[in-house]
Amino acid sequence: MLPPVETDEEWDAVVPDESVMRPGAEDLCARLGLADRPLTRFTDGSQPVYAVGDDHVLKLFPGAAAQDGVAEGRVLSHVQGRLPVPTPRVRDSGPYENGWRYVLMSRLRGENLAAAWDRVPRSDRERIVTEIGETLAVLHSLDPDPLGDVLGPGDWGAFLDRRCADAVERQRERGLPDSWLEQIPDFLASVPLPRDPHRSLLHTEVMRQHFLVEPEGWRLTGLFDFEPAMIGDRAYDFVGVGLFVTGGDPALLARLAQAYGHSFAPPELLAYTLLHVYSNLPWYMRELHAPAEGTLHSLAEAWFGTG
């Protein structure tokens, strides 16, 4: 029912087109015994994801991202019941047609934290970031070895070398001004990142958008989207924390780090920001603003300092 999607052009033509996607999702739901459930596509996310009634979520992965589907199913099964915050329970997963894969999972309850954030009182924000810090501490304590066959990057030092080699051009393509671009090589050279760190299971996109919260009492009710998970240095997960959870608020980051049990130097976290798989410094600057001083070291302190 779904056509092959192996190229960017095929992705752009197929994945956003609900007239193509929906019949495939309906067919797959019928095969899974869920034909009678209403099907509603979520508007967020890069992959096509559907609510199937009130109790299930169906996430589809085209051939170009099939390995992500394998990884998500494995990671969700690995962390199930082991974190302080609920995660989706895998109900079924496997191949579909023409290279597509799927993960059928339980539906978490609650409102997206990013959408709710402006309504959350300060005291509840403090408690929420404490819970996130505690959750990350547990996630990073889990043995990642059972996932070593599906999660990269394998050699962390080689991963850093590849990201460093492309760091300037990557930000240039995103529109970063030359005054910032010219600082990147020396800044990265000045920050000693571990080439062989303790191996931790990383979510890699720890952001409000991937947490759910119950507005009645403002308690976390879910953490989801493990498809980009990796195994590597735990500091890498704090890129999303500083940018998209605490949002440059030093007091909130300090509280989260205290709950986590460790804090990281701001230059280290900005270095990982530049090297992150989804790094986009101009976007972050628009969201969080850049300090008047205009240096990467001042930027590191503004976004990742704890006061």
Image (cartoon, rainbow, N blue to C red):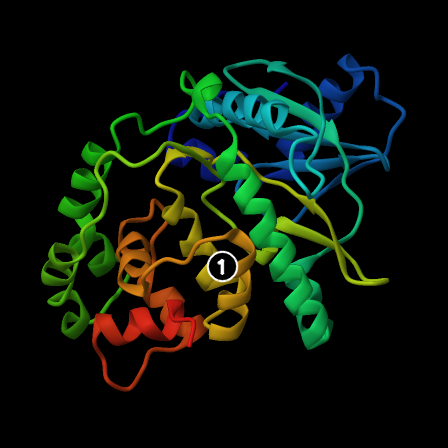
Q: Quadrant of residue 298?
A: bottom left
For the question of whether residue 63 can be seen, the reply is no
The answer to whether residue 22 is seen in the rendering is yes
Residue at image coords 66%, 60%: 128
Element type at marker 1?
helix
Placement of 76 over or under 43, stated as above or below: above
Identify which residue is drawn at 26% across, 63% down.
267
| Residue at 42% from the left image edge and 77% from the top image edge | 307
Q: Nearer the viewer, residue 136 or 60?
A: 136
In the rendered image, which quarter contains the N terminus?
A: top right
Q: Position of residue 228 (x, y in %)?
A: 46, 36
Closer to the camera in the image, 27 or 146: 146
Residue annotated with mark 1: 257
Determine whether, in the image, residue 60 is placed left or right of residue 9: right
| The one of 109 and 252 positioned closer to us in this rendering | 252
Which residue is pictured at 37% across the width and 32% down the height?
199
The location of residue 110, given as percent across then percent down, is 79, 51
Looking at numbered disc 1 in the image, what kind of residue is underneath it? Ala
Residue 286 rendering spot, x and y as whole percentages:
40, 73
Horizontal side of residue 246 vs 194, given as left or right: right
- In the rendered structure, the answer to whether residue 262 lies left or right of residue 34 reads left
Vertical order, 68 against 119 (above or below): above
Mark 1 residue crowding within 10 angstroms, few (<14) / some (14–19) / many (20+): many
How far across and how far down the image is residue 245, in percent?
54, 61
| Residue farthest toward the bottom in the current orientation of the protein | 292
Q: In this figure, what is the number of numbered marks? A: 1
